[in-house]
Amino acid sequence: MKKKLLITRKLPSHIIEPLRNYYDIAEWSEEEAIMPRQRLLASVKDCEALWVTLADKVDEELLAHAPNLKIVSTLSVGFNNIDVSALHSRDIIATNTPDVLTDTTADLVFALLLATARRIPEAERYLREGQWQGWYPLQLVGKDVGGATIGIIGLGRIGQAVAKRALGFNMNVLYYNRSRKIANEEQYGFQFREFEDVLKESDFVVIMTPYSKETEGLIGARELALMKDDAILINAARGGIVDEDALYHVLKDGKLWAVGLDVFEQEPVALNHPLLTLPNVVALPHIGSATLQTRTAMMNLNVQALLAYAQGQQVLNQIH
Ligand code: DGY
């Protein structure tokens, strides 16, 4: 008898096709809207396998509704949507999608860095709104990226990919990480600093740390105050790492050159969110890994894990 798999998103049929040999698949039929929680709890009842996205919480409540669950795959590298210890205490495997999205996400971080420094969205609005009357010397002047100091909080895989891009812009690379990355220091000249010193010394502060209880609110009023008055803050990791309220007040008071955000505490962010009223906030709808190649590669990793489980083989990309 085939195992039951629930997929909480509509995914391309050619991607999930190989799973049909092993699983009876129930799929949420809408591509954009998430599966309502009550529907998810009801649908997961008989499932042995569950394929989720970062918008679906896999917690004690869900597990109580899913007595047969044995494997959960998330279409993301971040797994703050999953209560990993609750899964492990029930011997349920959890898998994610590392590596394949590293470069794509680092590109997006750099896009935000350039967009904020050179005021790209603001300049585009200026043109389209008919404000462009001609060229003048201090029109839409930005900040140089080349030669500036970038400070990366969290030098994991994506942080390292951002740092390597920064070298191409002749930037001075500082980083803070719980453990020193000596090989990176020796090979690329990245310089370790204590957390607060990264904030104080950097022209661009880039948040690349995973979201957890320890990093929740990591950048609040005190940390923002330590940053240079004309620094730029980029967050493409998770919303809850930066205190949005504190960030809004700091920006309102004229501190920081700009902020680039691909992630928010609540997603989708409310259109009346105070941060969206500020011209120097560049806001994106969590598109860090959103290229066709990368999203396809991520989905394929989930498929591989679910297939390996069904075939009794070793499951790769397990979250430990
Ligand atoms: C992730 O994978 O964790 C990203 O946030 C979504 O691509």
Image (tube, rainbow, N blue to C red):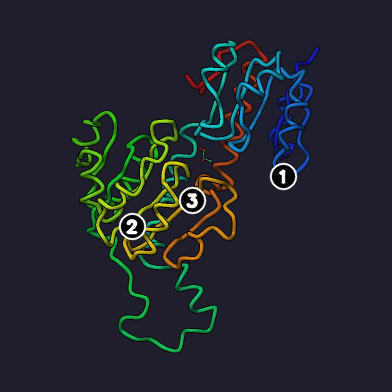
Mark 2 neighbour density, 10 Å: few (under 14) some (14–19) many (20 or more): many
The numbered mark, 3 or 1, whose residue comes first in the sequence reads 1
Q: Residue at x 60, y 39 (%)?
A: 296
CA separation in Å, label 2 and label 1: 34 Å
Marking on residue 229? none
> Residue 163's x, y, as percent?
31, 45
CA separation in Å, label 2 and label 3: 14 Å
> Residue 319's x, y, as percent?
50, 22
State the residue position of label 2.
232
Amino acid under disc 3: Asp
Amino acid under disc 1: Glu
State the residue position of label 1.
31
Of 312 and 203, which appears nearest the observer? 203
Marking on residue 262? 3
Q: Residue at x 59, y 34 (%)?
A: 75
Within the image, what quadrant is residue 72 found in? Answer: top right
The kind of secondary structure element at disc 2 is strand
Left or right of 203 in this view: 8: right
The kind of secondary structure element at disc 3 is loop
Mark 1 neighbour density, 10 Å: few (under 14) some (14–19) many (20 or more): few
Amino acid under disc 2: Ile
Within the image, what quadrant is residue 188 found in? Answer: top left
Q: Nearer the viewer, mark 2 or mark 1?
A: 2
Q: Residue at x 36, y 46 (%)?
A: 220
